[in-house]
Amino acid sequence: MVAQFEVGKTYSCRSICDYDCIFSFEVVKRTAKFVSLKDSGGKVRARKVRVWDGAEVCDPHGRYSMSPVLRAAK
């Protein structure tokens, strides 16, 4: 069973560069391959979902070398 992102829930992740920096996003919409995330400023972005280690993950700020990775809870 794969843990999935759920609409209405808020997910958080930490910055790789600064442990005290926590990013929080609310899932406002969901399809089979994408989630729409609302950040603290109210901006909504659609991000592609992939499965890693038994849970769905996505890159809320885009995919780059030190980007935070948002993970659905197991």
Image: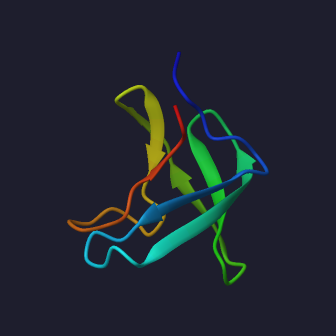
At 58% across and 67% down in the image, what residue appears? 24
Q: Is residue 20 above or below residue 73?
A: below
Q: Residue 19 placed where, x, y %? A: 33, 73
- The residue furthest right is 8
Q: Is residue 28 above or below residue 3?
A: below
Residue in the foreground of this view, choosing between 65 and 19: 19
Total residue callouts: 0
Q: Is residue 14 above or below residue 6?
A: below
At 43% across and 38% down in the image, what residue appears? 50
- The residue furthest top is 1
- The residue furthest bottom is 41
- The residue furthest front is 20
At 62% across and 49% down in the image, what residue appears? 35
At 52% across and 31% down in the image, what residue appears? 74
The answer to whether 15 appears left or right of 73 in the picture is left
- For residue 6, what is the image quadrant? top right
Q: Residue 59 placed where, x, y %? A: 42, 58
- For residue 67, what is the image quadrant? bottom left
Q: How is the image coloured?
A: rainbow
Q: Residue 30 placed where, x, y %? A: 70, 44
Residue in the foreground of this view, choosing between 32 and 58: 58
The answer to whether 47 appears left or right of 37 in the picture is left
